[in-house]
Amino acid sequence: MAWTVRKHTPDTFEKVARKYFRETPEQEWTIPGFCISAGITTRTFQRYAHMDGYEDLCQYIKDLINDKREKMLERGEGNCNGIIFLLKATGYQDKQQIEVKHDLNASGSMTIEEYIRNAAEEMKA
């Protein structure tokens, strides 16, 4: 089913955003809180985030909220575990994953020693 009905035009959406950030205490800024004030669901917000005219504003809203959370962490304000949880919910990661791919020999297997030797040679290159 195609989604075509929009509660807000880009202009009215921006006005709602300005009002939310002006009237809501900074420590209470959240995406769900913004959505409630805008009269939309978080799912609608995510849809807006991929639509022409709304993309930059949605990203700016996310950036404002995340910037405030980062600053609260830096200053040791609020519940740090809660802030970290909220940051992770919006895409922040506290670890990196590195994927290692290596071709196997013709028989389809290689010994650990061969794998380590090959990996070490590739790292030198």
Image (cartoon, rainbow, N blue to C red):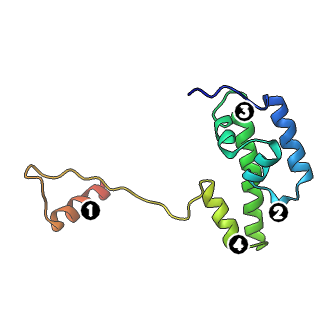
- Amino acid at circle 3: Tyr
Q: Is residue 90 left or right of residue 60?
A: left
Q: Residue at x 72, y 62 (%)?
A: 70
Q: Of 21 and 41, which appears nearest the observer?
A: 41
Q: Of 22 and 46, which appears nearest the observer?
A: 46
Q: CA distance from mark 3 to mark 2?
A: 25 Å
Q: Identify the residue position indicated by label 2 in the image.
A: 27
Q: Nearer the viewer, mark 1 or mark 2?
A: 2
Q: Identify the residue position indicated by label 4 in the image.
A: 80
- Amino acid at circle 1: Ala
Q: Nearer the viewer, mark 1 or mark 3?
A: 3
Residue farthest along the right direction in this orientation: 23
Q: CA distance from mark 4 to mark 1?
A: 40 Å
- Amino acid at circle 2: Gln
Where is residue 19? Give x, y as percent: 90, 44
Q: Identify the residue position indicated by label 1 in the image.
A: 120
Q: CA distance from mark 1 to mark 3?
A: 48 Å
Q: Identify the residue position indicated by label 3 in the image.
A: 54
